[in-house]
Image: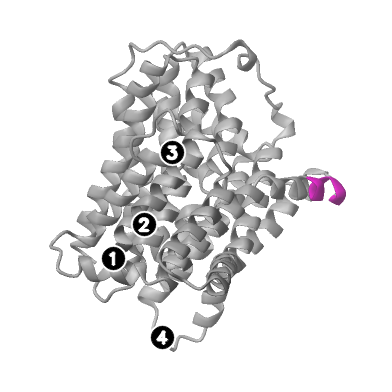
């Protein structure tokens, strides 16, 4: 019966979001109430469970996602993202243009939300394609593969960060393993795949042909742009490597761990960006703070969606559904990693949103992820891979790509959907291979 209730809850989630276009946060709360009542939870306990789920989920994430949005906005507004793109393209040359855009997407995609990175970088893709005469899909898809992988796999992006918190996974290790898995996934789904679809004609809509491109003197230098964009990753990576290789009693280890804490790393990066990409560029503090403030409005709904998923997760735990599912799967010979990926894939196909799919799947498989012998970091990445699978007409990213590249639905399925599915499959293969060594 609990399994039937969860299945009905996911169906309701799908219908309300996909068919009736109801806000995902409202939908999560409705489904949480449905599951709780169907499971026989007392009404006052159900309300407490929802409140606790929201509070526990947002307590840690609020700072990371808030600082991440601020950093991404500063990188975009200052022209650092454009500087990274134009310099890498000029250094790599036309022959290796795809690799330049892959690297650009990866660097810019780490601190920047997918939709923001897409809108910021797509005009530059159009410019590169027009100046080189190369097919637009051939030029653009590798960069979008990078953006998609960072969105689905790597902290500080919302879904992988929230799932890591749910599973009590180490964010540094999740990031390290995620980068290892991301590299082959991006290469296969980006440069290699795009070479097979050169015959698909994409033409940008006229509104995007002549975008506003900053002049050279308006942008920061390449070195400071890359350093500022990747600073939180560097700090977290240093702390992770220190945990692996330095003795426990090393006198600097507490300081390294403190600086590598994701919250502190993001705070330091924002403070550095305020100076390097703002004040040092001649901007006044009020202007820089306006940019920082406006970034928060862009993540408000993301935070609410994550909060709603946290509420559903807590109801699944408190009502006993999670334990029931865990007991059902105890005798299963299917790998928990494969099962987590499959559940995330099913929800992704039904609901469309990668974030919703990842967080919902995480709530369902939580007991498995916290069981002895299961690598929590790889479970995060397995769900992230599944959440990117089979993007189609119920996914906002599908339509964003279709409209900007002026493609038919059929050609969008042949390009975007296949690229996203390749990322998801390669991610799963990477997770399973890495699991044999960890």
Residue linked to disc 2: 6
Label 3 and label 4: CA atoms lie apart by 44 Å
Residue linked to disc 4: 248
Instruction: Report if the CB atoms under discs 2 and 1 are less than 8 Å apart.
Output: yes
Residue linked to disc 3: 352
Please identify the quadrant where the N terminus is shown.
bottom left
- Residue 71 vs 43, above or below: the answer is above
Q: Nearer the viewer, residue 426 or 128?
A: 426
Of labels 1 and 3, earlier in sequence is 1
Q: What residue do we see at 31% from left, 54% from top?
A: 382
Q: Secondary structure at mark 2?
A: helix
For the residues carrying marks 4 and 2, which lies nearer the camera in this image? 2
Q: What residue do we see at 41% from left, 43% from top?
A: 149
Label 1 and label 4: CA atoms lie apart by 38 Å
Pinpoint residue 61: horizontal percent, then vertical percent. 57, 63
The reply to whether residue 128 is visible in this rendering is no
Please identify the quadrant where the C terminus is shown.
bottom left
Instruction: Point out the stretch of residues depicted in magenta.
Output: 285-290
Residue linked to disc 1: 325
Label 4 and label 2: CA atoms lie apart by 44 Å
Q: Secondary structure at mark 1?
A: helix
Q: Nearer the viewer, residue 178 or 115?
A: 115
Pinpoint residue 10: horizontal percent, then vertical percent. 40, 49
Of labels 1 and 4, earlier in sequence is 4
């Amino acid at each position: 019966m609990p399994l039937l209730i969860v299945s009905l809850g996911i169906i309701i989630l799908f219908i309300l979001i996909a068919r009736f276009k109801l806000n995902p946060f409202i939908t999560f709360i409705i489904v949480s109430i449905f599951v709780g009542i169907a499971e026989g939870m007392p009404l006052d306990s159900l309300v407490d469970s929802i409140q606790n789920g929201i509070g526990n989920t947002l307590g840690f994430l609020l700072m990371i996602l808030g600082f991440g949005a601020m950093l991404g906005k500063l990188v975009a507004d200052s022209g650092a993202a454009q500087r990274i793109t134009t310099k890498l393209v000029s250094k790599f040359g036309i022959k290796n243009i795809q690799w330049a855009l892959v690297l650009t997407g990866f660097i810019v995609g780490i601190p920047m939300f997918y939709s923001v990175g897409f809108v910021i970088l797509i005009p530059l893709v159009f410019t590169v394609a027009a100046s080189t005469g190369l097919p637009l899909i051939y030029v653009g898809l590798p960069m979008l593969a990078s953006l998609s992988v960072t969105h689905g796999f790597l902290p500080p992006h919302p879904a992988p960060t929230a799932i890591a918190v749910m599973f009590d996974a180490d964010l540094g290790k999740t990031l390290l393993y995620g980068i290892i898995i991301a590299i082959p996934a991006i290469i296969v789904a980006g440069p290699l795949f795009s070479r097979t679809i050169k015959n698909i004609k994409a033409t940008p809509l006229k509104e995007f042909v002549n975008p506003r491109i900053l002049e050279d003197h308006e942008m920061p230098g390449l070195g400071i742009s890359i350093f500022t964009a990747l600073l939180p990753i560097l700090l977290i990576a240093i702390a992770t490597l220190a945990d692996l290789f330095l003795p426990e009693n090393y006198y600097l280890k507490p300081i390294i761990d403190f600086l590598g804490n994701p919250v502190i790393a993001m705070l330091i990066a924002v403070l550095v960006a305020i100076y390097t990409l703002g004040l040092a560029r001649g901007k006044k503090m009020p202007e820089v703070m306006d940019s920082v403030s406006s970034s928060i409005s862009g993540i408000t709904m993301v935070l609410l969606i994550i909060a709603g998923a946290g509420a559903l997760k807590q109801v699944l735990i408190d009502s006993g559904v999670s334990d029931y599912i865990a007991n059902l799967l105890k005798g299963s010979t299917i790998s928990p990693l494969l099962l987590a990926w499959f559940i995330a894939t099913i929800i992704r196909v039904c609901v469309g949103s990668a974030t919703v799919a990842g967080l919902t799947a995480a709530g369902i498989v939580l007991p498995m992820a916290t069981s002895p012998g299961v690598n929590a970091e790889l479970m995060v990445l397995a769900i992230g891979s599944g959440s990117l699978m089979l993007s189609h007409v119920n996914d906002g990213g599908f339509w964003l790509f279709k409209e900007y590249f002026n493609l038919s639905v059929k050609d969008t399925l042949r390009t975007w959907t296949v690229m996203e599915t390749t990322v998801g499959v390669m991610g799963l293969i990477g997770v399973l291979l890495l699991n044999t060594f960890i």
